[in-house]
Image (spheres, rainbow, N blue to C red):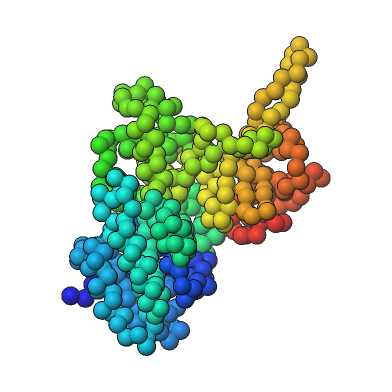
Amino acid sequence: MQPTFDRTTRGEKMAERKHYLNTLIRHQWNQRIKVITGIRRCGKSTLLFDLFKTHLLRSGIPESNIIQLALDDDQNAQYRDPNNLSVYIRKRVSDSHQQYYVLIDEIQFAISREELTQHDRPVRLYSVLNGLLHLGNVDVYVTGSNSKMLSKDVSTEFRGRGDVIKMYPLSFREFCEASSLDRRDAYDLYCMYGGMPYLLHLDSDEDKAAYLSTLFEEIYFKDIEERYSIALPGVLRELTSALCSSVGSLTNASKIAKTLQSVKGLKVESETISKYLNDLIDSFLFEEAVRFDIKGKKYFEYPSKYYCTDIGLRNARLGFRQQEESHIMENIIYNELVIRGYLVDVGVVPLIEKNAEGKRTQKSCEVDFIASKGNKKYYIQSALNMDDADKARAELRPMAAIADSFKKIVISKSYGKSWTDETGILRINPIDFLMDENSMER
């Protein structure tokens, strides 16, 4: 039976995802497996089966030379066995005089639960994908929603023949362009519901809220519980809510375990919390930002900050009750930085002060983000309001204490337009920062 593929959004309006599409186009026929990772429902299937396939067809590739397979479809369950997957694809690409494109969605379904829970390497799957490359007439693209068995293993299991393309929900710029809304209206909507692509097809607030809430219960939690054999699903849910409630706050597994016991009456070991934290990160629901001592040039082991991959999911998990605009803006800025390809840390800088008795004391202050890419580095403060003089001084003091010459940026809604002040700090409002992918170079 021919494998099935059904898309409810076919023919409907969709975001163009130009960055990701152009990346796939650049990597065509580079003799490497293209691994597109990211949270489920962030648009990987649309990128592969709609946008990239449309590009191939417009380029003159016959549809018969494009083999597409959605492994999360129950009708394709037989192909979750790597042996069956290999037999099926090899039959479809048997003409050595033709070039074929193999597009496989949600490849982690071809990894057994035993391999995931026992930390075994899914050797059979990797052998199948490597074997397809050896044919010479096959270009392979796969998507997956589990980092532990995909992006973390690509360099070793694919023997240097894999490219990881990490995909995120819509950036604000992508959302704004696809929604055709005024920038300010789009920003307010984005702060509430985030950038999951399917939201573009929903009109009412009720439908948007229900969709995001359903993603947690019907997709994310079920995936994590099944694939990691979660023994305490209630703890997983409370942990998720706790992380959503405290985005931008320093925490660790031990602190969370104590909070769950005191607030929720859940007695759970910090080791269990640590494992569930890793499971949430491996499923791309959250990302961890660790602290970096700017003066001492070293990382702190703990505590860290955790940011939700999509702010709409964060809000939905909390029932849209905790709408702290400063935390929401900080989370959105963090997501924008990682979408742009930066490694993002939390900066710690020492400040020397005199107390009331005139004695010198030292305290640590925080720089919200250190964004690094290659030899570029930026220090960034996210400050919702800078109208108050005391607030402005508090936000700028850590910047003044940094001795190196890397660029410093303050993002605040108080700024009507961007400018660089007399100390060299770029002042910019969040909408301008998010809409211009080169905004950090102003």
Residue 192 image point, x, y percent: 45, 48
Residue found at the far top of this picture = 357
In the rendered view, does 151 fall on the left or right side of 272? right
In front of the other: 152 or 314: 152
Classify residue 357 as left or right of residue 330.
Answer: right
| Residue 21 x, y percent position in the rendering | 48, 70
Q: Quadrant of the C terminus?
A: bottom right
- The quadrant holding residue 93 is bottom left
Question: Which residue does the image show at 39% across and 35% down from the upper left?
Answer: 274
**Residue shown at 67%/34% (left/top)?**
296
Residue closest to the far left: 1
Tally of numbered tags: 0
Q: Nearer the viewer, residue 279 or 237?
A: 279
Is the N terminus in the top left, top right, bottom left or bottom right quadrant? bottom left
Can you give x and y, in whole percent of width and height, for residue 382 in the image? Answer: 61, 42
Which residue is painted at 67% across and 49% down in the image? 377
